[in-house]
Image (cartoon, grey):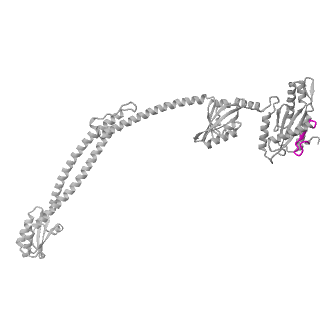
């Protein structure tokens, strides 16, 4: 439906409404005029009766039939009266026109009183009004009034329609046509004639122009925003695709949503598994430390912030273990559940470097055993894990016999060979959980973990001494035997801290040296000069 058709329908609706109002008002005023004219005619009849009332009363009082007849004859001369009669002493003394019983219900009567006593009723004067004539005159009068009012209303309605069309319909039709020809963003606006600049039409045009300006501003902002979003999307897509870090998105259950090429390069996966949309747990598939990775995912979802750790992964292609630094961050919720973004960096070389540095810091460069610092740290850690009253362990302090003589006689290379051989023998004679360290020079330290029985410790000490009976080839064709002085202290029996345990083991070792070397002894707190030895 176009605006012209709408305006025609509006005009027809206004005309129909005006016609309805005219008909309704005409009907109302016709009825009012008819009732008024009828009432006026009835009052005229009543006034006629009142005019001849005195004469009729005298005729009734004296019983003068001739006078009474003149009165009723005179009344019927009026065209609104068709009959009249005078009754005195229940007898008609004068009658003219139609006064039969059929007209009884239409009679209009008036009482006749005595001329000298108003309280004495002497008769009654009754007339029959000409009701059809009265009604006809009332209809004519009412019709004339209604037609006049209808004509006036029709003229007014026509003038209103003309004004509505000229002042509203025509300007609105013009604005509508102009608005249809305007495309948002082309800069065109509605123009208004000077006569409408201060009225509602002008205000409407101004509001439409303001709305057009707002729409153009919003369109321009949206266009710029869309352009920025496209640039950012392109930039972030490039970062995502070209990043050297593996970026992936997983659900809480570990199923993979998406990942960038670096992720597949690090893990050795060639494509997203088809079962990724099902129950395939990519975390358990890729991470060797998958339980720790799953804990980090849950922790990030609960705390709503990132959590990271160094984790191990096994690549699919060469089954090689790599270290990655992985950061898990909450990434919002989807219909399938909560999602987590993961970013992983290959830190394999760094990890190996750290392990190498730690190894250099904690290992003796000649023998490969733990150095003094590592041994002291291990002893402190073991005491913290096994407080007083807990599991016992033993500390052996070993000093080589005749090492200085061999080193001075055959040189440092020979001494180094002795130290390397002794270190290898000690490492083979104890468990992997025990600590074997070189404290410096020809001094060694053993920490026998969970060795609470003295008989077991004696057996190990004796095995160590027996192993040294095998000679060492310090130079081609030159064999030498090395003895050992071993001092043993027990935790917590001989000390409740690292310093006291080491000190007591050292005291026991020096007593062995004073008593002939190549033996072992337990620290005896009751007599430092006579410790418990293998020969006692």
Is residue 80 depicted above or below 364 in this figure?
Answer: below
Is 338 a magenta residue? no
Q: Position of residue 532 (x, y in %)?
A: 91, 43
Quadrant holding the N terminus:
top left
Is residue 252 depicted above or below 270 in this figure?
Answer: below
Q: Position of residue 261 (x, y in %)?
A: 63, 29
Q: Position of residue 391 (x, y in %)?
A: 81, 46
Whether residue 2 is visible here, answered yes or no, is no
Nearest the eye: 380 or 166 = 380
Is 527 a magenta residue? yes
Give the residues drawn in magenta, as a range: 515-529
Q: Is residue 110 left or right of residue 290?
A: left
Nearest the eye: 124 or 282 = 282
Q: Is residue 160 left or right of residue 473?
A: left
Whether residue 34 is visible here, answered yes or no, is yes
Q: Is residue 86 left or right of residue 286?
A: left
Nearest the eye: 132 or 124 = 124
Nearest the eye: 378 or 302 = 378
> Which residue is pictured at 93% across the width and 38% down the height?
515
Quarter assignment of residue 383: top right
Q: Position of residue 128 (x, y in %)?
A: 14, 66
Number of dots carrying numbers? 0
Quarter assignment of residue 61: bottom left
Chief secondary structure of the magenta span?
loop
> Which residue is pictured at 27% across the width and 40% down the height?
167
> Which residue is pictured at 15% across the width and 57% down the height?
137
Residue found at the far top of this picture:
476
Quarter assignment of residue 259: top right
């Amino acid at each position: 439906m176009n605006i012209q058709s709408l305006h025609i329908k509006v005009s027809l609706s206004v005309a129909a409404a005006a016609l309805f109002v005219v008909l309704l008002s005409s009907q109302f005023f016709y009825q009012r005029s008819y009732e008024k004219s009828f009432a006026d005619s009835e009052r005229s009849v009543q006034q006629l009766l009142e005019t001849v009332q005195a004469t009729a009363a005298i005729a009734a009082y004296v019983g003068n039939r001739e006078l009474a007849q003149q009165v009723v004859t005179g009344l019927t001369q009026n065209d609104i009266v068709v009959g009249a009669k005078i009754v005195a002493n229940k007898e008609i003394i004068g009658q003219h026109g139609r006064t039969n019983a059929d007209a009884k219900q239409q009679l209009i009567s008036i009482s006749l009183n005595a001329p000298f006593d108003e309280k004495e009723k002497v008769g009654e004067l009754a007339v029959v009004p000409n009701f059809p004539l009265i009604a006809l005159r009332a209809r004519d009068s009412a019709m004339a009034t209604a037609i006049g009012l209808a004509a006036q209303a029709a003229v007014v309605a026509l003038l209103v329609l003309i004004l509505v069309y000229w002042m509203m319909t025509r300007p609105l039709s013009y604005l509508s046509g102009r608005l249809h020809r305007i495309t948002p963003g082309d800069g065109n606006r509605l123009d208004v004639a000077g006569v409408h600049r201060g009225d509602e039409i002008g205000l409407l045009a101004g509001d439409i122009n303001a709305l057009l300006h707002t729409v153009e501003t919003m369109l321009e902002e949206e266009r710029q925003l869309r352009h920025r979003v496209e640039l950012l999307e392109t930039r972030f897509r490039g970062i995502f695709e070209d990043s050297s870090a593996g970026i992936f998105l997983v659900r809480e259950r570990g199923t993979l949503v998406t990942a960038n090429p670096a992720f597949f390069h690090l893990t050795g996966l060639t494509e997203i598994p088809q079962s990724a949309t099902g129950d395939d747990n990519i975390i358990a598939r890729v991470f060797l430390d998958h339980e720790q990775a799953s804990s980090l995912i849950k922790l990030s979802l609960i705390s709503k912030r990132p959590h990271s750790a160094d984790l191990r992964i096994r690549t699919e292609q060469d089954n090689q273990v790599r270290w990655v630094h992985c950061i898990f961050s909450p990434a919002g919720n989807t219909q399938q559940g909560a999602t987590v973004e993961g970013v992983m960096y290959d830190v394999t070389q760094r990890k190996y470097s750290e392990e190498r540095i730690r190894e250099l810091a904690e290992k003796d460069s000649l023998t490969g055993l733990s150095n003094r610092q590592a041994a002291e740290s291990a002893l402190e850690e073991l005491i913290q894990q096994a407080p007083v009253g807990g599991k016992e362990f033993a500390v052996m302090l070993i000093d080589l016999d005749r090492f200085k003589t061999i080193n001075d006689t055959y040189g440092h290379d020979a001494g180094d060979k002795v130290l390397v051989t002794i270190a290898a023998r000690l490492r083979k004679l104890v468990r992997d959980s025990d600590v074997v360290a070189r404290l410096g020079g020809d001094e060694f330290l053993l920490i026998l973990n969970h060795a609470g029985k003295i008989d077991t410790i004696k057996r190990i000490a004796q095995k160590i001494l027996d192993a040294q009976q095998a000679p060492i080839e310090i130079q081609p064709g030159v064999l030498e035997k090395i003895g050992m002085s071993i001092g043993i202290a027990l935790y917590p029996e001989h000390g409740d801290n690292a310093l006291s345990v080491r000190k007591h083991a050292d005291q026991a070792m020096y007593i062995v040296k004073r008593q002939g070397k190549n033996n072992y002894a337990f620290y005896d707190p009751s007599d430092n000069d006579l410790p418990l030895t293998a020969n006692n």
